[in-house]
Amino acid sequence: DMAPHGITIYGQENDNATRALAVMNMWLHNFADAEILQGNTMATPLFTNEETGELKQFDYAVANPPFSYKSWMNGLDPKNDVFKRFEGYDAVPPQKNGDFAFLLHIIKSLKSKGKACIVLPLGVLFRGNAEAEIRKKIIQKGYVKAIIGLPPNLFYGTGIAASLIIIDKENANKRDSIFMIDASKGYIKDGNKNRLREQDIHKIVDTCINLVETPKYSRLIPT
């Protein structure tokens, strides 16, 4: 419905088994022509513009990078990054924490009206030092449209609470607020994990699309 003319899907994943799962997923959802490549997104992004050598840019991007990845600089010198992902932010993400590195990669990979959603630990909202500098710059550029706080213990491999960062480059220079949703209370226990119910997902989506302000749940915060 959202893409009446069809979509072309591209993806890159470092772990080969996870990449194989993604390919199988594409087949099951009738996107057999999706191009899912295996490789290190930070050190060797595989989707580039053949003529300019710059990163290929997309209309939409979704990403669930490894939380607080400690080895994101492997094979990469951020200060001399040929793709210029870290230029204009007054700081480089900390060596032992790749959350903002992946976020900046996604931002650089979007077209001028591109939109993205990235899953990151809640800590990206308040950690200090270099990350605070980068966060401030991203907000000043107007790239962040919304932030959604999720319940803890949703994802396999970690119990920490995560957030969805919604990036929208369209009209970013005119954006003067961020829509924030605290969806951390809406879930059901499912074995030893928590799970979002259909009603929780619908509430998040409806609230976000229509910018509905609800006491103790959602609010438009001026920047």
Image (cartoon, rainbow, N blue to C red):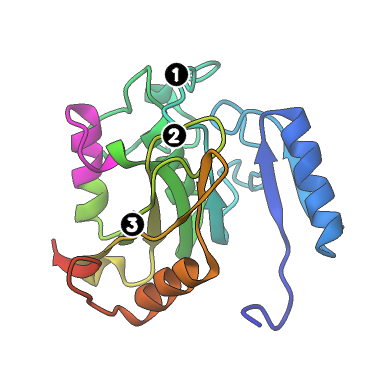
Q: Which circle's residue, 1 or 2, is located before the other in the chain? A: 1
To which residue does mark 1 refer? 70
Q: Residue furthest left?
A: 222
Q: Position of residue 137 (x, y in %)?
A: 22, 46
Q: Nearer the viewer, mark 1 or mark 3?
A: 3
**Which residue is under mark 2?**
159
The quadrant of the image that shows the C terminus is bottom left
Is residue 88 among what the camera can see? no
Q: How far from the left and from the top, in percent, is residue 177?
A: 19, 67
Q: Is residue 77 above or below residue 171?
A: above
Q: Earlier in the sequence, mark 1 or mark 3?
A: 1
Residue beneath the point at 43% across and 37% down: 84
Q: Quick check: 12 above or below 181?
A: above
Q: Amino acid at mark 1?
A: Lys
Task: Please tell me whether residue 62 is drawn above or below residue 79 in the rendered image.
Answer: below
Q: Say whether residue 142 is visible.
A: yes
Q: Which residues are magenta?
A: 124-136
Label 3: which residue? Answer: 185
Q: How packed is label 1: few (under 14 Cα within 10 Å), some, or many (20 or more)?
A: some
Whole-number angstrom distance, CA of label 2 to CA of label 3: 15 Å
The Cα atoms of the two marked residues, 1 and 2, are separated by: 18 Å
